[in-house]
Image: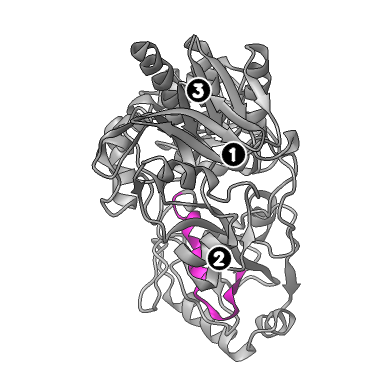
Amino acid sequence: MPNIVVAGAGLTGLAAAISAREAGADVVLLEKGSRADVGGNAAFSGGLFLFCYDGAEDLTSITQDFEPGMHAEEIVAPPYTREAYAAELTAMSDGQADPKLVAALAERSLDTVRWLSEKGVRFTFNRTVGAQVRDGVLHIPPGQILTSTGEGMSRGFEVIKPLLRYAEQIVVELRWSTPLVDVVREGERVTGARTPDGVLPADAVVIASGGFQASRESRLRHLGPQWEEVKLRGTRQATGDGIAAALRAGAGPAGVWSSCHSAAVDPTMPAPERSEASPPFPLHGFWLGVLVNRDGERFVDEGPGPWVKNYSKMGKAIMGQPGREAYEIFDQRTAARVADEFAGAAVPVSAPTLPALAECIGVPAEALVRAVEEFNRACREDGSTHGIEPAKSHWAVPLDRPPFVAYHAVAGLTFTFGGVQIDPDGRALASDGAPVPGLYAAGEATGGLFYGDYPGGAALMRAAVFGRSAGRTAVTEALQRG
């Protein structure tokens, strides 16, 4: 029976460990943090999975659960095809995403969601990603349909809990507070994993320990000096140790190391210290209003497309502004919806006039009034703007119904985009493209799929798809080696 070591007990690592165990291996799952840190970044996510499906039957085969107000006897769900998934991810990477990884993610996505459901992960139809009930019919736009069950938008821990229970039931050996120190390689192949307690002999090692966003030194080196001090939205354990160990063992780097997922967040919210804690809530309501910097000026297109496909770059836009801060401004057309769906526990500032609001948030009143008035004049009936820079491409509606509200926003760093080079089956590849025998990687520890931006729900899907593949491939090839 092969011995497999998996480093990292997030969604990627749990998927890899479960897959390897089900394939017949003895599995040791290492977690750098304590049991309270289980889940990695997935624990702090919105629990959204982007997957392909042919219609409503595929969706209802996964879940019959609906959020309040969403239940309908009839569901209309146009297909979200593999081709559409691949085209969307490729476009959002400016054509840089590895086409083999893109194709594998799309091809395996539906089966993997079903696999997660079999392990106890519960899903539900969710209104915050575009589904609407009209005349008793639930209308679902292609993609971003289901989330895990849970409260609010930070429901990812509800994905982790059943997977952890299942891993324990099938006797995956979990070692808490046991970081991967190094990958042991003898000759051409990996033979073990070094921990503070010594070397664990292994027929294969799977790197699933996340990116390097929690390392101040790595942020400075790869993202730049403005990112040295930044609010973390995700796990404190992802300091790039697994990536570095894989590179030392012969894996090559991949992806864009100077880019990251960074959403707009409430600066008063503390970074999470355990997996069950809520992370700084992403302020996803930007598309329903305008974003201004502390000079009172707009600086970004708030509605280039659906928020779920653009939120991960709003933090980077804010990071380039004076003081690295901004304010999301709304009026009474949208303030209630923002508070209900897109702001979490963040408390806005409210004022009866724009000059009064400007005084409350400390921006120049004349500049804020001018910015909003110019925006209002530029709004067109089709939801676009005309004659202003930057434009607002969609959902442009005048802000003219006081009182006005503002949410203070800063960048919240979630994960980085550079990592280990892999193939679609999770094999770690050297710089020349040859597999490193016995070494595998998946999830945020890898590069080559996300560049600059990606559609919401693809990150958790990547973790589950390639974690599962890496675990299965590790066992299959260990058995072949004998």
Circle 1: residue type: Ala
Label placed on residue 202 = 3
Nearer to us of marks 3 and 2 is: 3
Question: Residue placed at 54% from the left, 22% from the top?
Answer: 17
Residue denoted by label 2:
289
Circle 2: residue type: Gly
Of the image marks 1 and 2, the number of the one nearer the N terminus: 1
Of the image marks 3 and 2, the number of the one nearer the N terminus: 3
Of the image marks 3 and 1, the number of the one nearer the N terminus: 1
In the depicted view, which residue is nearer to us: 244 or 356? 244
**In the rendered image of this protein, does residue 424 appear above or below residue 213?**
above
Circle 3: residue type: Ala
- Residue 368 on image: x %, y %: 58, 83
State the colouring used for the structure image. one colour
- Residue 210 on image: x %, y %: 53, 43
Label placed on residue 42 = 1
